[in-house]
Amino acid sequence: MIQLVGLLGLVAFVAASLVVGLRVLVLATRTRQLPELAISMSMLLSGAIGTGLLVLPLLVPDPSIEAAYYSFQAGSASNHIGFALLFLFVWRVFRPREVWAAGLFTVSTLVLWTGGIGTAIHVMPGGGIPGRDIPPDLWFWLSLCSRFVVYGWATFESFHYYAMLKRRLALGLADPVVADRFFYWGVCTSAVFCIWLNLAARAAFMDLDWVLAVSDLVSALLGFVVAGSLSLAFFPRKNAVENPEASADSEMRS
């Protein structure tokens, strides 16, 4: 039952990533801007395709060793490309002119791909997946640590911008819809950051049955949080869009 709930959370995450990713991709074809293209492809490659391929063997009764292996390899490759595009999005949107940000993006991406390529080389058919079926290895931790850094960076920047816009909103100098989008994007990235924390805890204590059970429940909860906040970040609330002045007045009174 717990595993089923965890699976439902992953399915919700995949569905939201697919719907929102396609919508932003349509926008990117009109704007021809890098941020829209990067974030849309990130959601599609890592959120929808990559995660979907990793979940697929769990939905198929008794999958063959070869099918599970190739599904993992394809899903992992898609995920790592999507993660790198998210890294690019964070850098180009929040700190495009900062030298330190360019360096952090470059180093994080190199560490990410080193971990991803190392995992692809060392995982063998029927040999188990590091951090899931067998103890985590160096490649697992390299990939995961790079995600900790950049998703944490994204969360900080999102809430930082939200706080600035809230102050401007009180003076009538900001759009409440844009402020809400930064807030929900911060919730989304922080939930993903917590997913990586949960994955790290699961990998570190995989011999404890209660940790695995709690991990499944946490994954489900976080999957639903990501799905909901991602949708709100890119699908603004109807009342806020139709009457932004009323929303601003409400914020000022609060």
Image: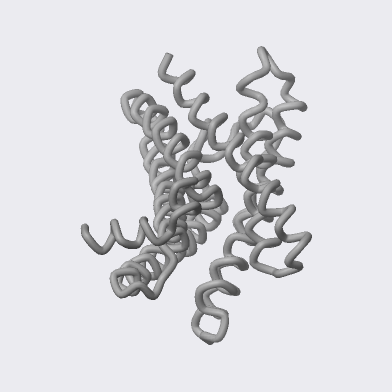
Tell me what residue is drawn at x 68 percent, y 55 percent.
Answer: 81
Residue 239's spot in the image, x, y percent? Answer: 44, 47
Q: How many marks?
A: 0
Give above or below for 7 relative to 251. Answer: above
Tell me what residue is drawn at x 43 percent, y 34 percent.
Answer: 219
Closer-to-camera residue (120/233)? 233
In this picture, residue 239 sits left or right of residue 171: right
Question: Which color scheme is applied?
Answer: one colour
Give above or below for 34 relative to 59. Answer: below
The part of the image, by quadrant, that contains residue 107 is bottom right
Quarter of the C terminus within the rendering: bottom left
The part of the image, by quadrant, that contains residue 55 is top right
In this picture, residue 50 sits left or right of residue 151: right
Give above or below for 22 relative to 6. Answer: below
In this picture, residue 54 sits left or right of residue 163: right
Tell me what residue is drawn at x 54 percent, y 32 percent.
Answer: 12
State whether residue 117 appears in this view: no
Extreme-left residue of the structure = 254
Closer-to-camera residue (104/33)? 33
Closer-to-camera residue (226/146)? 226
Residue 88's spot in the image, x, y percent? Answer: 61, 68
Tell me what residue is drawn at x 45 percent, y 21 percent.
Answer: 5
State whether residue 196 appears in this view: yes
In this picture, residue 123 sits left or right of residue 246: right
Residue 41's spot in the image, x, y percent? Answer: 69, 54
Residue 32's spot in the image, x, y percent? Answer: 76, 67
Quarter of the N terminus within the rendering: top left
